[in-house]
Image: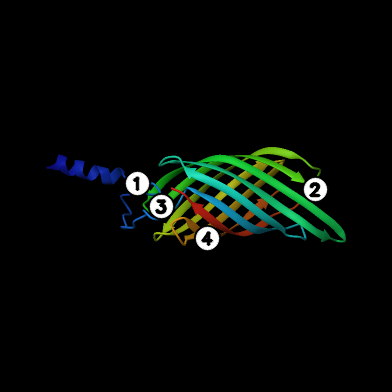
Amino acid sequence: MKIIKKAYLLPFLVSPFAMADDGIEYGDYRAANTPVNYSFINLEVGNKSFEELDNDMMVARVSGQTLLNDSFIFKLGYQADLLDEANDGTEISYQDNLANIGVGWRYPLFKTTDIEVDGHLLYNWNDGVLNNDVEQSDLGYRVGIAINQGIGDSFDMTLGINHTEIADRSITAAELSFTQYITEYVGIGINGHMAKRDDLLGDLNYIGVHMKLAFY
């Protein structure tokens, strides 16, 4: 009898889902029984303000990722920071470009909660001159960790922190994102981050809106 009881309890003791089975069905908005959707194309626009820059920058971003299996996610993206304004009587035209490719690894804590770590290779180049910078291109990297939380059957939330090293700049950012899927394949949301930077522009705040086009 004792052996039977131990054998019956063992799967529940080792399963990461054992502590939270809330009966939520994820078939319509989730893949591979994950708490958030990991396979989508993301379109985003936002506003970035720097501590030492009078003018804000507009941000346009397109990115995509796909769940390769139950644990690994492939990611890539492109972002442009745009500034085209007059500053103290001087016309400024500047565009900073950032491309990334990376991989993430997710681990389920509960049925509705994952922890995710990821790493990215970055390529940065710019057009125009800002704060006496010369046109240049650089390679760098970004590493991060996040908690992904599913709420109900169609709401995703992510809270994370990441660190970037590129072009002699060291940047540490805290990020928060919310997405509501209004159909099986379309989600809309808001996201933002605050970053500590060690360059001439100083710390920054960012807020953006996004649309995710999911695929399964």
SS at badge 2? loop
Q: Give the percent coordinates (x, y) of residue 87.
A: 83, 60
Which is more N-terminal, label 4 or label 1?
Answer: 1
The CA span between labels 1 and 2 is 51 Å
The CA span between labels 3 and 2 is 43 Å
Which is more N-terminal, label 2 or label 4?
Answer: 2
The CA span between labels 1 and 3 is 18 Å
The CA span between labels 3 and 4 is 15 Å
Relative vertical location of residue 155 with respect to residue 34 in this rendering, above or below: below
- Are dots 3 and 2 in contact, CB under 8 Å? no
The residue labelled by disc 4 is 188
Circle nearer the viewer, 1 or 4: 4
Using the image as rendered, state which of residue 91 and residue 193 is in the foreground: 91
Is residue 36 at all visible to an observer of this figure? yes
The residue labelled by disc 1 is 16
Circle nearer the viewer, 1 or 3: 3
SS at badge 1? loop
Residue displayed at 80% across by 59% down: 85
* Quadrant including the N terminus: top left
Disc 1 marks a residue whose amino acid type is: Pro
Residue displayed at 75% across by 55% down: 83
